[in-house]
Amino acid sequence: MQEKLIEKRWILPPIKESLISTIVENLGISRLQSILLINRGIITPEAAYKYLHPKIEDLHNPFLMKDMEKVVKRIFKAIENGEKILIYGDFDVDGITSVSVLQSALEELGAKCKYFIPQRLSDGYGLKEDVIIDSKKQGFSLVISVDCGIRATEVAEKAKEIGIDLIITDHHLPGEKIPDAYAILNPKQKNCTYPEKNLAGVGVVFKLIEALFTEKGFKEEARKYLKIVAIGTIADIVSLTGENRVIVKYGLMDLKNTKNIGLKTLLEFSGLKNKDISCMDVAFKVAPRINAVGRMGGTSAAVELFNSSDQEFVTKVVKDMNFKNMKRQHEEGNILKEINELTIKRPEIFKEKIIVVAGENWHRGVIGIVASRLVEKYHRPAIVLSIENGEAHGSSRSTSKFHLLNALKYCNEYLIRYGGHALAAGLTLQSDKIEIFRKKINEYAETVMSEEDFKPELKIDSYLSLSDISFKLVEEINELAPFGEGNPLPVFATENVKLYSGPWLLKEKHLKIKVGNVLQNFDAVWWKKGFLFDELIYQKKISIAYTIHLNEHNGNTTLQLNLKDMKFPNEK
């Protein structure tokens, strides 16, 4: 089936001249940089200055977090009494980095601690009663959860019953009932006045480490963990504003010079040796390698990687990470191939408001990624199910227009179990219920979604002429970094630009053109859009939306446009 370009609506925020003028006059920055800040909700000179110049001193006092003082006292009591502490984590990058930094910090303070991370495929997510019970038998008296536990009410009751002090550190939304744990660190819980509500799980752990080190009189020592904390923060796709912005900026700042042998080796195998590392590098090169360990079965090696000084061991671990990541990509490719065949056999599935696809023994570690790919391609929610022994285990992803958890509640009668939030959820049902479930969830979608909800949008920061594009502009853009969730890389648009030369195909799947004229032209690349090659042969002028990047090749640095969308003259 020939792939087609799906038309997107370009959305330009309203121009607020009074705000623009105020920021320009007070800070002496360019009009365009002022517009970029305002588009990100930064509307006062004071906020704009702080955004452009984040300082490590902007980190909040960790003791503002509810229960922090109680937690710090309990941990130091455990250290003084020689108690055994169990750190209970999650299998994703946020959980792995949380376990790694907390274990390292506690051991530095003299604690006796071990960790447990569940297996994604066999154990599933979250705190488990049997692990808590077993930890008691092994002599642990204190369990600290990281990146999980805020809804584990039954597990908390069991811990209390058997004499385990359970400290929950989490960043997910609490349920109606809060676990009766010894203490809870979660800025999202009620009556917690901590100013930053958007910390990742590893961010909450960092605040705990900061509090512990502050209590000992060497607060600044906690900052050495920011490199790994930044990786977990970026990987968990939390908003890179406020305190997260400070964490990530300072974590990335000196990442290429890290002395952590495991981290250094991981960066080298990710192709980032001696390079200034961006959020995009972490999100697309580093995090997938860490995540692959849990997705493909296994977790402990990823933690040991960051806490080992044995070069031979860490090299072996990173090579295994690379292998598992390639295996993950292979599994993902196989599933997508089967789904592509399904578009021919059952095209009606992909025209429904909610795409529900299923296959025998699809790898459960990658179906969430596949669901995300379907959302990107079809601009509608997607549920991917792996059928194993009569049960269908699913992972789903959504758009901002559709609340997944509410939809699954509507279909509760057909589900064995489910959980998650508005944009991502997991579910299990009997395989013979798949068709009726597909019908039921689309029945719900009909009541809450309109055709307008399926029209994709692209937010444009500003229209430019090609003459506006310069190295100085790139410098101004980069002053807004780090870019990610909540602070997207600026997207610009230029209308009726001349297609100067090309198109060319790169690796048979990517598209490359030159836009402009003989005096000024730019390479423009559109990843995975090679199918547009034939159509572009006949075009003379196009309108493009893009981000601007520095391209270094053979010692030369040029400006390159990474295309986000394209409109042809006959389009409105």
Image (spheres, grey):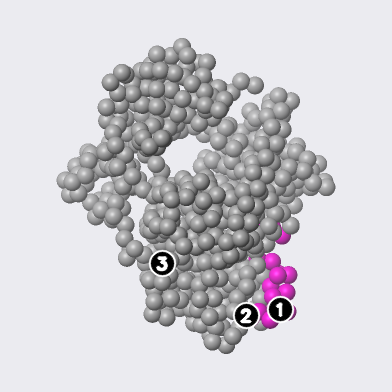
* Mark seen at residue 297: none
Q: Are marks 2 and 3 in contact (CB under 8 Å)?
A: no
Which of the 4 image quarters holds residue 163? bottom right
Looking at the image, which is closer to me, 382 or 179?
382
Which quarter of the image is occupied by the N terminus? top right
Residue labelled with disc 2: 84
Q: Is residue 524 left or right of residue 358?
A: left
Looking at the image, which is closer to me, 20 or 500?
500
* Mark seen at residue 223: 3
Looking at the image, which is closer to me, 27 or 421?
27
Query: Residue at coordinates 38% horizontally, 55% vertically from top-left?
Result: 253
Return the disc, 2 or 3, that comes first in the chain's sequence: 2
Q: Is residue 49 above or below residue 160?
A: above
| Residue type at numbered disc 3 | Arg
Cα gap from disc 1 to disc 3, whole angstroms: 33 Å
Q: Is residue 140 magenta?
A: yes
